[in-house]
Structure formats: structure tokens, C-alpha cells
Image (cartoon, rainbow, N blue to C red):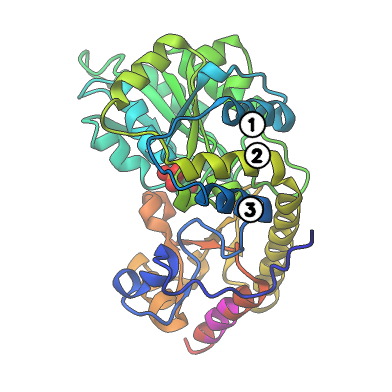
Amino acid sequence: MKYDFDQVCNRKNTDCLKWDMMEPIFGSGDLIPLWVADMDLPVAKPIIDALKKRVEHPFYGYSQAGTSVLNSVVERMKRKFNWNIKPEWIVFTPGVVPALHVAVRSLTHPGDEVILQEPTYHPFFPVVVNSGCKIVNNGLKMNNNRYEIDYKGLEEKFHSKSRSFQEAGRIKTIIFCNPHNPIGRLWKRDEIIKMGEIAINNGAVVISDEIHCEILFKDQKHTPFASISKKFEQNSIVCMSPSKTFNLAGLEVSTIIIPNKKLRDNFINTRYGIVPNPNVFGYIALEAAYNHGDEWLEQVLDYLQKNLDYLKQYLENKIPNIRVVDPEGTYLIWLDCRDLGMDNQTLSNFMKKKAKVGLEDGFIFGESGSGFMRMNIACSRSVLHEALNRIENAIDTL
Ligand SMILES: Cc1ncc(COP(=O)(O)O)c(C=O)c1O
């Protein structure tokens, strides 16, 4: 079936975070919202059909993933990533962020340290701090408009001479993001190996947030962290979900893959009574998406690629002082606005008050995000055009 993503859909008055919360979040309801990470593109028909069918069965009691749900995850990992997983490795949670909280708590004691690589997805900060741990930032390095992992910095974080006796060995985990939100890098196999070796050899378990692993631009291939080797498998917690790929965030279902039994038991004990299972509709949507969603996904990825090309062309031709940091994955585009010469607050106000476009401020992803903005391009092309037009016109008035 052919989907028409050019058709603009009205999401207002549907309890939609992105569209209905603009007033409290941006101070005005007339912005074009290109912020929170969901798509303004309607979901795949097989998912809607499966949900409708389940709604007709008038029992919505406690639910538990059955064999066919588990198999759909196992088969997808094999089909998409040639990764052989076992059904018993899978733990379902109603989101990746709650799973990250559980994972960090299961691996640390208060006072321990967790490595992040800024600029990074901002909810990672409370994940660490609210667990009573300290953030150790091993910031990404930018080289020729491309971000790279600072391996030397990572080694040093584990071995720093300046660290006190009490702090030595307190780094228990690293939250790795692949593809990396907000900068869109898809870390390649050799990069994952280099980073993973340093972390694991120094006693840190890698929590790998791979929620965006199926939103990839042309010719990109994702490698799950735990698929690298037995050693990587036994020292990692991989967080995946159909929520970004199939636009199901509101159905709250995530698959946390933990091959190591001890780590898995620890995770399950830590989440007990605090982070529940997903709801029944989440499982239904996941299974339909993984088994029957690929025709839709192919069309979405093609549409996103064209939106990216459109955005780059538009900026190059008409707004050359804003540049795209070339992404390999995610529909969240990291815009380098430093040539506008504005400080963080001025840039933020400029986008929301003058251009009337709702973007994410770069600085919320860490200090190194200063001068950047994050734009969600998963919308109809005419909406993207209108947003760019507004930014262009606002810049003309400067
Ligand atoms: C890297 C990353 N992790 C997690 C999430 C959110 O996960 P969830 O809604 O499943 O809690 C997002 C959403 O944008 C994300 O970008």
C-alpha cells in the first residue's frame, strides 16, 4: 500500500504533547512544532488493524508478552541486524527512559559515576543524578563537521591521576547512544569496538540506548552493541523499542535485551514494583509493527531522506549561516547556528518568538550544544518548508 505523507494531518486536541503543549512550553500556541521526537506521519495500517481487532475483545486486564510477541522481537533482531538473541534475554518496559533509570540503579551505588558523551540526549542527566551518581562527561569531539568519540579522554577518565583514591574504580557504567541523539551519528562497528573495549576492560557495563536504530539514512547499517562478541554481549544492556521506528511512543513499549543472567536478574529485581510491564496495546502494536510494518517503514525512510535533502538544499541556498551536521540516523537534525552570532538565550528566543518555530535548544544537551538547535524533520514536506520559510524571513529582519 502507498502512504501519502504529503497529506498534513491535524494532531491538535488529541492530547498530543508536541502540538497541544506548545503554549506552556514555548509561551505561544502558533509555532510550528519540530521538537519532541515523534513523527507527524500516520502509522502503518497493519498496526491500526491489529489494535482495532484487540479493542473489540472487551478485556483489558493485566497483560504479559506471549510467545508470538517474543518471537517477533527475536526474528526482527535476526532479520535486521543478523543478531541471534534468545527470548529469555528480553525484558519489556513501558519506555527506554524508565529502563535507563532501572539499569543505572541496578549497576551502581550512590556516589558511583556514570560516563556520558555530551552533547547527549538530556534525560540521561537525571537518569544519573537521580540515581545518586555523578556524571563524568567524556564529550564528543567535532572534526570537520563530524563528531567522534574521544577514546583518549575515555581512557583518561578511568585512569586519571588526579582522581582521588575514593573515586578510583567508581565508574560503573557508560550510557552509549547509537544512533546518537542529538547529533545523528551512527557509530560504526570499529568505533563501537574501540569504545566498548575501553569501557569493559575497565569494569564498566555499557548501557546502549539504540532506540533510533532503524531510522537510518541512505546505505547505513546498524550494529547492536551486544552483537559484537561474547564479551560485549555479557557486559551490556541494550535498549530498543519500536516507538521511534514505527511512531508508537504513546503506546509505551520497549524491549530491553540483557543476555547476562546476573545483570538481567538485577535489572528485574530493581524494576520490581516501580516500572511495570507495558500495556496490552503496546504488545499488539509491537508485534504488528515488527511483523508487518516494513512496507510502511521503507516509505517513511525514503520520505525522511528526501526531507533531509530538502532541508540541506534550502539552508545552503537561502540560510547559509545555519548548517546541517550531516546525520547518519534519527530524524532529529543538529543545526549549527553558531554563525548567527547569538548567545543561547537570544537564539532560543529568536526561534520561538521571531521565527515562530518550536525547536529544541542545543544547550539542553550539554554545554557543548551551545549555538546549536535540534530540528525534528519527521513531518510533511510542506510543513518543513513553512518552518524554513519562517526562519529565513526572521533572519532577513535582523
Ligand atoms: C536516545 C533516546 N532514548 C530514549 C528516548 C525516549 O524513550 P522512551 O519514550 O521509550 O522512554 C528518546 C526519545 O527521543 C531518545 O531519543
Residue under the point 54% across and 24% down: 195
Numbered circle sitting on residue 224: none
Residue under the point 23% across and 20% down: 109
Mark 3 residue element: helix
State yes or no: discs 2 and 1 in contact (Cβ < 8 Å): yes
Q: Nearer the viewer, mark 3 or mark 2?
A: 3
Residue 60 position within the rendered picture, expressed as x and y whole percent measured from the top left: 41, 43
Q: Earlier in the sequence, mark 2 or mark 1?
A: 1
Amino acid type for the residue under numbered disc 3: Asp
Q: Residues within 10 Å of mark 2 (few under 14, many from 20)?
A: many
Residue 164 position within the rendered picture, expressed as x and y whole percent measured from the top left: 22, 18
Q: CA distance from mark 3 to mark 1?
A: 17 Å
Amino acid type for the residue under numbered disc 2: Tyr
Q: Is residue 212 left or right of residue 80?
A: left
Compared to residue 332, the image places residue 269 above or below, namely: above
Q: Is residue 53 left or right of residue 5?
A: left
Q: CA distance from mark 2 to mark 1?
A: 6 Å
Quadrant, the N terminus: bottom right
What residue did someone put label 3 on?
49
Q: Earlier in the sequence, mark 3 or mark 2?
A: 3
Mark 2 residue element: helix
What residue did someone put label 2 on?
290
Residue 91 position within the rendered picture, expressed as x and y whole percent measured from the top left: 46, 26
Q: Which residues are magenta?
A: 387-393
Amino acid type for the residue under numbered disc 1: Ser
Q: Nearer the viewer, residue 202 or 130?
A: 130
Helix, strand or loop for the magenta stretch, by majority? helix
Residue 270: in magenta span: no
Please state the total of marks drawn on the protein image.
3
What residue did someone put label 1 on?
72
Residue under the point 63% across and 20% down: 227
Q: Nearer the viewer, mark 3 or mark 1?
A: 3
